[in-house]
Amino acid sequence: MADELSTSTFRTVPKTGVIYVTNEATKKGFSPSDANWCNLGQGQPETGELPGAPPRVQSVAVHPDDQEYAPVAGIWEVREAIADLYNRQFRRGMPSQYSAENVCVSGGGRAALTRAAASLGQVNLGHFLPDYTAYEELLDIFKAFTAIPILLDPERGYSFTAEDLRKEILGRGLGALLLSNPCNPTGKLVDGDEMARWVQIARELDCTLLLDEFYSHYVYRSRPGAVPIATAARYVEDVDRDPVLIFDGFTKNWRYPGWRMTWAIGPKNVIEALASAGSFLDGGGSRPLQRAAIPLLADEHVLAETRAIQDAFRKKRDHLLSRLERIGVRVDRAPEGTFYIWGSIEGLPPGINDGMSFFRAALDQNVIVVPGEFFDVNPGKRRQGRASRFKDYVRFSFGPSMATLDKALSRFDSIVQSASTR
C-alpha cells in the first residue's frame, strides 16, 4: 500500500537529451574515465590545458566567512566584478552602466533560467524549434505563462530576422522570447547589426529577450586571432529599462562546468525578482567558488581564455565538419558558434538513417551522440502522436579532445560501411 501511494504521488519526469543518452551509455558500461568511450553527446567543453590559455585553477581557498551561506543573489564582490567586466568589454563610453544590482548569481545555468521562468507573469513566451533540450520541462513546469513554439526552417539555414521577430511579437502577442545564442544545437548566431535591431524591436514593442549566452565565447565568424564575444549587452541603451535579460557563466565560456557558477544580468527590478525566486527555489550558489571566480573575471584572463577557445575549437569544428560530410551527414548550416554540429543523417544507409537508430548503432561502438528529436522542444507534450520534425538529425559535440573526435570518426566510418554492405 505504501509503495503504491509513493508511486502515484510523483509524476514521471522526462530526462534531457544529454542525461538520457548518458544513462543509456552507462547501461553498456560507459564511464567518463574509460578512454575507450567517445562522448560526442557531452554538453561540456574539454576542461584541461589549451595552448595560449591561462593556467587552470587547481585549488580554491576557503575563507572563514565562506563557511556561511552566500546571499541568494551572490556575494557583492563577484556581482560587482561581473558588472564591471560587461561595462569594460561591451559598454565602454555608454552613459548607462551595469552595477552589482544588475547581476544575480546562481548555482548553474538551469538554476538561473529556472529563477527567470518562475518570475514570469501571464505572458506568451516564444521559443524556437530546435533549441536547448532542457527548455522543454522548464517551459512546462511553471503555469503562469504560455509557451509558444516558433519553427525555424532548415531550408533557410534556421534564419530568423529582426522583421520575423517583429511579426511574431505582433502576431502572437509575445511578451517574452527565450533562445540560446549561439543556438544549441544548430550553431546559428545572431550578432552585430542584426542583434542591435532585435534589441531595438524588443524595446519598442516591450517584449523581453531572455538570452542564453552560455556559448557566446565560442564564435567562429571572424578571422583567427580576433576575439569576438557575442552578447546583446553591446546594444542595450538603458540597463534598467531595456527588456533584455542575459544568462552566462563559467560553465562553458570559462570551461569550468563543475563550478556551477553562473549569472543573469539585466534591469534591477528583474534581478530583484530573480533573487526572490531563488530564495525558495535553490537558496543560492557556492560562496567559496564565487570568491575564487573574481580573479578570473579580469580582462586579461577573459581575453586569453576566449582567444584559446576560439583557436582550438575552430580547428575541431572544421575537422569534424569535413569528416562528417564525407560519410554522408548533411549539415544545413556550418555552426557559427557553440561546440556542436547539427546534421541530418537522412542520406545514410537504411538502418542508421534516423537519429535514434544512429544513436543505438554508435552506442554499440562506444560512441555517444544525441538524437535530434530531443531538441524538438515540446512543453507538456502538446504535440503527442506526431513524429518529431528532427527525427533524422543528430547533434555531434566537438567539446572533447581532437584525439577523441578522431577515434569516434573512425568508428562512424565503420558503422556506415557496415550498413552499406547489408
Image (spheres, rainbow, N blue to C red):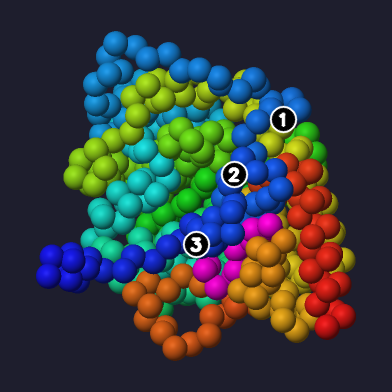
Q: Residues within 10 Å of mark 3 (few under 14, many from 20)?
A: some
Residue 372 lies in the magenta-colored region = yes
Q: Secondary structure at mark 2?
A: loop
| Rendered view: 127 above or below 292 | below
Q: Where is residue 303 drawn, in percent x and y? A: 64, 28
Marking on residue 50: 1
**Gap in angstroms between the C-alphas marked 3 and 1:** 30 Å
Marking on residue 20: 3
Residue type indicated by callout 1: Leu
Give the mark nearest the N terminus, 1 or 2.
2
Q: Where is residue 399 drawn, in percent x and y? A: 66, 46
Give the mark nearest the N terminus, 2 or 3.
3
Q: Residues within 10 Å of mark 2 (few under 14, many from 20)?
A: few
Give the mark nearest the N terminus, 3 or 1.
3
Q: Which residue is mark 2?
A: 32
Q: Is residue 359 left or right of residue 374?
A: right
Q: Are marks 2 and 3 in contact (CB under 8 Å)?
A: no
- Count of labels shown? 3
Residue shown at the point (59%, 44%) measured from the top left:
32
- First to last magenta residue range: 366-375
**Gap in angstroms between the C-alphas marked 2 and 3:** 15 Å
Q: Secondary structure at mark 1?
A: loop
Looking at the rendered image, the disc whose residue lies closer to the viewer, 2 or 3, is 2
Quadrant containing the N terminus is bottom left
Residue type indicated by callout 2: Pro
